[in-house]
Image (spheres, helix red, strand yellow):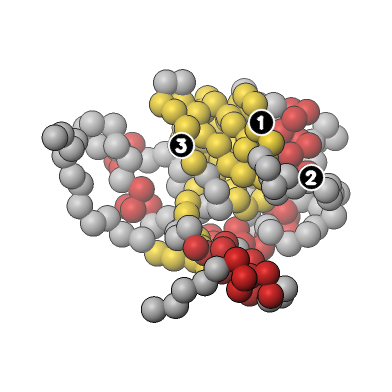
Amino acid sequence: MAVFTEIDWAERKDRYWANFFNTLSGVRSSVLVGTTNLQGQHNLAIFNSLVHLGANPPLLGFILRPTTVPRDTYENILTQKYYTLNHISESMFDAAHQTSAKYESDVSEFMATGLTPQFDAQNNAPFVKESPIKMLMEFQEEHLVVNGTRLIVGQVKEVILNDAIIEVDGSIKVADEHLVATSGLYNYHRFSFLKKKSFARP
């Protein structure tokens, strides 16, 4: 059994500890965030920090890295207020991962990766057609974290999914859509349903 302390990660300066701490929290849900800028350019980027914040109203958040360099997703959310969250299935994770590449602002990640933008009549934020579970979000607020990252909070305005995966109690059988989970920046995992437990009481 290994034991590490602050002394260890203070002495080694390469990507080792960045990878270590990026995977320490375990597997996480990944989504593609779809946005559009004021010029009509569509942007798509992968984020692996989606978190449930509340059900009434329905709120979801994700962590955005420090804005010390241009962040097209961040700027588009602030100016347009609407964006989409798109779950990633096994059949599309290669293309989804490629959206993390540093494309120029005038290059659409949809075109670069072969993913397909999909729109409804109510907004210009692009869904990902290939995604089995899609959400339209409205920006609510942001919270600056001590390390310069930002928690972006949005309210769910629309959900698109196969109604066959919704249980009688409203639970969504996400494993049925073969979604992927991530640990760190480069590791993708399959996950499967284990068991549904009842509400725990003393």
Quadrant position of the N terminus in the picture: bottom left
Q: Nearer the viewer, residue 140 or 170?
A: 140
Dot 3, how many residues are within 10 Å of its Cα: few (below 14), some (14-19), or many (20+)? few
Mark earlier in primary sequence (2, 1): 2
Q: Is residue 25 left or right of residue 12?
A: left
Compared with residue 16, is residue 52 higher up or lower down, i.e. above or below?
above
User: Mark 3 or mark 1, which has the lower sequence index?
Assistant: 3
Examine the rendered structure and indicate whether residue 202 appears above or below residue 196: above
Marks 3/1: CA–CA distance: 15 Å
Point out the image quarter for the C terminus.
top left
Q: Residue 19, percent across and down?
A: 60, 69
Q: Which residue is mark 1?
A: 142
Drawn side of residue 135 relative to residue 124, left or right? left
User: What is the tally of numbered marks visible in this picture?
Assistant: 3
**Residue 126 picture location, percent across and down:** 65, 39
Amino acid beneath label 3: His
Q: Which residue is mark 3?
A: 52
In the rendered image, residue 192, in percent from the top left (x then y), is placed at 31, 59
* Residue placed furthest toward the bottom: 1
Among numbered discs 3 and 2, the one appearing first in the sequence: 3
Viewer can see residue 43: no
Q: As drawn, is 65 to the left or to the right of 133?
A: right
- Amino acid type at circle 2 is Thr
CA–CA distance between discs 3 and 2?
23 Å
Q: CA distance from mark 2 to mark 1?
A: 13 Å
When the figure is inspected, residue 28 is found, relative to residue 197, above or below; the finding is below
| Picture layout, residue 160 above or below residue 14 | above
* Residue 34 found in image quarter: top right
